[in-house]
Amino acid sequence: MENLLSLQKDFYEQQETIRTQVKEIERLMEIVKSNSDTNVELLTELTLNGGGAGGKVVKTSKPKPTYNKEGDNKIQQLELANRVEQSKKVLPNTCLPVANKTICLPNFICIGTMKSGTTFLDYYLQKHPQVAKHTKKEIWFFNSFYSYGVEWYANHFEPVLNFDNQKLIGESTPFYINNPNTAARMFVTLKNVKMILMLRDPVDRALSQYYFSIKWLERNKSQPLNYTFEEMITQEIEVIDTCVRGNQKYHEQFQQRKLDELNGDVDEEEEWDVINPFYQPHTDKNWTFYKECSRCEKCWPTGNILHTSGHPTFGMVAKSLYWEQLDHWLNFFPLDQFLIVRYEDLHVKPEKVLREVEEFLGLPAHNYGDFIPKNAVPHEKMDPKMEKLLTDYFRPHNEKLYKLLNRDMGWRR
């Protein structure tokens, strides 16, 4: 009887040893699955000495790590992160079921800027075999047609037929960057989208927009643009100084006033008589092309440099104030989701720029053939006085951009 009890005790001890060993193996295998960097080291730790009931885990390299509850949570988080990354590889686009079908949205968008090579870049990316075709370059979804819904948006792209080898989906609407609504809308719709931002010397970009507008009005049989470049630029600068800078200055003064009141630096009987020009009519000013800006909210609804106008003649100065536009977008997206492309580089070495774009998007290199300018409009040289005026005007804004990007764009100084 004693021998039987002894054998039973040994059997239970052996079972417990096996259970402990199995649990240890399972724990180590979970670590292997959740952290690929330690796969090799951990696999060598899964060597059993002798197997059977008396087997033990033998460490052949580093000592076996000991994890507390917090460590186990980190392991689970790593495993979940790996699952998400794997799903991105399988389904790289934002895809969702709508009306018994699956629609897929862009995973890259060229958001601006106007007259900075967006047509050229879009034309050649559409030649890449791993990029889905779209119905047109500028869809204007996030600035003008957001209320139409994502299914309307998805219908502008080549449908996804094979989820094992999806093409990248993209579009190019250069008015996205300067619109006050697009960043927030894009964030809630396509949080992980990659964005390409084309930038050009702001002086050259403004002049190019002026001549493009003349041709655009002719092509669309609209009333011609009966204003010189100088008239339009000087008027817009005055409007911006009043409606945007004046509004910003007012709020700075108001905040300072509140601070002075808290510190007891203001006489209680002293009245606050500063007027915000944003809410005042400006019918006394000789604004001809920008006459609608006599009510500031008509042109600058948010009180800053961003505006909703998609008309090509509007905002020749505002669209060249890149720092303020990008600074707004950084409230929603990290800088590493943007690829900043100089128009000047695209003009001189397009093949190199397209390689950078391919690398940013994770596309294989493609031979695009000969490069031909797209949507280019010939124009006269700028008057030297106007060139100096705009160079001086944009200089502090450019310097802010250079500092933000940690990159000198090499434009006029």
Image (cartoon, grey):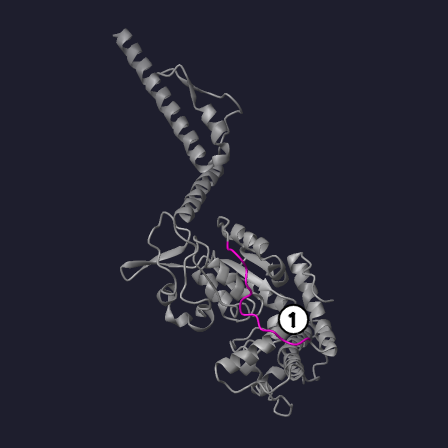
Estimate the x, y position of residue 330 in percent, counting from the top left: 57, 61
Circle 1 — which element?
helix
**Which residue matches tag 1?**
204
Q: Along the horizontal axis of the image, is 132 left or right of 269?
A: left
Q: Is residue 259 visible?
A: yes
Q: Furthest residue to the bottom?
A: 284
Amino acid at circle 1: Asp
Q: Along the horizontal axis of the image, is 248 left or right of 89?
A: right
- Name which residue lies at 72% across and 80% down: 267
- Name which residue lies at 33% across and 13% down: 10
Estimate the x, y position of residue 15 in percent, counting from the top left: 33, 20
Mark 1: few/some/many CA within 10 Å (<14, 14-19, 20+): some
Q: Is residue 373 magenta?
A: yes
Residue 294 against residue 62 in the figure, above or below:
below
Image quadrant where one finds the C terminus: bottom right
Task: Choose between 373 and 401: the one closer to the eye.
Answer: 373
Q: Which residues are magenta?
A: 368-381
Q: Furthest residue to the front?
A: 370
Q: Main secondary structure of the magenta part?
A: loop
Q: Along the horizontal axis of the image, is 141 left or right of 412?
A: left
Q: Is residue 300 visible?
A: no
Estimate the x, y position of residue 130 in percent, counting from the top left: 43, 52
Estimate the x, y position of residue 381 in percent, counting from the top left: 68, 75
- Name which residue lies at 49% across and 37% down: 71
